[in-house]
Image (cartoon, rainbow, N blue to C red):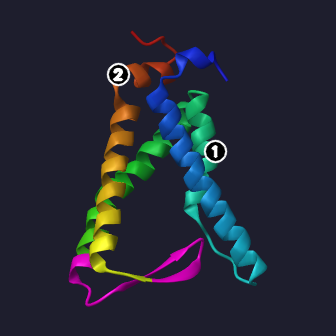
Amino acid sequence: MRNNELIPTSLKVVAALFMLTGATSLIAILLALMNGRIDIEFGALGLPIGWGLLHFSPGWRTLALVFLVLGIVGLPLIGLLFLTTQGPVGFSILSLPMGQVSKEVGLGFAAVAWVVSVWQFRVLTSDDVRLLFEGEKPR
């Protein structure tokens, strides 16, 4: 890792969020395997994405931006699905069914996730952070 002082706090938070997503996806994969299932969780790529962001890897930054664009486009569609459903919506954590929540809670979760995704995208596309991935020091 490069000098820790060069890494802006916002980039550290973005990397940590990707790593958290990656870790939860990895746990979901392991739980599925223990139950005799094979689950493909693309979120597990959050672990190397987070590591790559902290090491200023342009390729991992690009993949992070792709994931974020998918979220920025997909989360409003998920919100629309919540709006059009009748009654409560079933949800699971780490592939384990947890019960049901109201569609308002689901819509709220999608909205918060969208705002966080937009913020992460803005961090990764800001001039100071972009320069770090091009090998330059930020202003």
**Amino acid on which disc 2 is placed:** Asp
Real-space CA distance between mark 2 and mark 1, rounded to the nearest whole angstrom: 23 Å
The magenta segment is 81-99
In the image, 48 versus 91, the foreground residue is: 91
In the picture, the quarter occupied by the C terminus is top left
The image quarter in which residue 94 lies: bottom right
**Amino acid on which disc 1 is placed:** Pro
Residue at x 59% of width, y 47% of height: 19
Q: Is residue 24 left or right of residue 69?
A: right
* Image x and y of residue 95, in percent: 59, 76
In the image, 86 versus 81, the foreground residue is: 86
Residue at x 58% of width, y 51% of height: 20
- Residue tagged 1: 48
* Image x and y of residue 4, in percent: 61, 19
Give SS at disc 1: helix
The image quarter in which residue 110 lies: bottom left
Residue at x 36% of width, y 48% of height: 116
Give SS at disc 2: helix
Dot 2 or dot 1, earlier in sequence: 1
Q: Is residue 87 magenta?
A: yes
Residue at x 53% of width, y 32% of height: 12
Q: Does the magenta stretch include residue 47?
A: no
* Image x and y of residue 15, in percent: 54, 39
* Image x and y of residue 16, in percent: 55, 41
In the picture, the quarter occupied by the N terminus is top right
- Residue tagged 2: 127
